[in-house]
Amino acid sequence: GGGGGGAAVAQRIPERARWVEELGAALEAAEEARRGEVESALVEMVSGMVAVAALSEGEIERLLEKEALALNTSILQNRRAYAD
């Protein structure tokens, strides 16, 4: 017997798929917000460094590129982790 249980499970599949999709969208939004905050902080940091002339403009640009690459790498790693 027991044919009724499968229908209940089948009804939950679209609900769970929608939940996973919503979670993915929320994670994506959080990553974008984090990216915005980090980029803003980096711009502020660069402005401060230029103002006090702690580093040359070329050194500051290289530092900024390094930080931007690290941020993008982190975001890509997080996206892979969310996909798994």
Image (tube, rainbow, N blue to C red):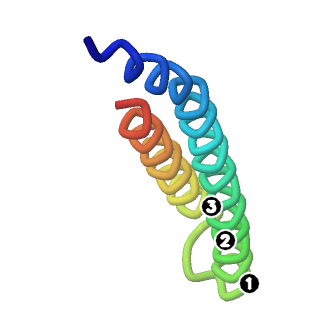
Q: Disc 2 residue type?
A: Val
- Tell whether label 1 touches label 2 (CB within 8 Å): no
Measured as percent of width and height from the top left, residue 18 is found at: 63, 32
For the C terminus, which image quadrant? Answer: top left
Going from N to C along the chain, the mark reached first, 2 or 1, is: 2
Q: Which comes sooner in the sequence, label 3 or label 1?
A: 3
Q: Kindly identify which numbered label has been placed on residue 51.
A: 1
Q: Is residue 41 left or right of residue 81?
A: right
Residue at the far left: name it.
Answer: 1
Residue 77 is left or right of residue 39, and the answer is: left
- Left or right position of 69 against 33: left
Question: What amino acid does circle 3 point to?
Answer: Arg
The 10 Å Cα crowd at callout 2, few under 14, some 14 to 19, many 20 or more, is some
Rendered-image quadrant of the N terminus: top left
Image x and y of residue 52, in percent:
67, 88
Q: How many angstroms separate mark 2 from mark 1 (CA)?
A: 8 Å
In the picture, measured across the screen, residue 14 lies left or right of residue 8, that is right
Q: Which residue is mark 3?
A: 34
Which residue is farthest front? 1
* Point 52% across, 30% down: residue: 12
**Which one is nearer the viewer's eye here, 44 or 62?**
44
Residue position marked by numbered label 2 in the rendering: 46
- Secondary structure under badge 1? helix
Of badges 2 and 3, nearer the viewer stands 3
Residue 53, picture quadrant: bottom right
Q: Nearer the viewer, mark 2 or mark 1?
A: 2
Q: Is residue 83 above or below residue 50?
A: above
- Residue 77: give x, y in percent of width and height: 39, 40
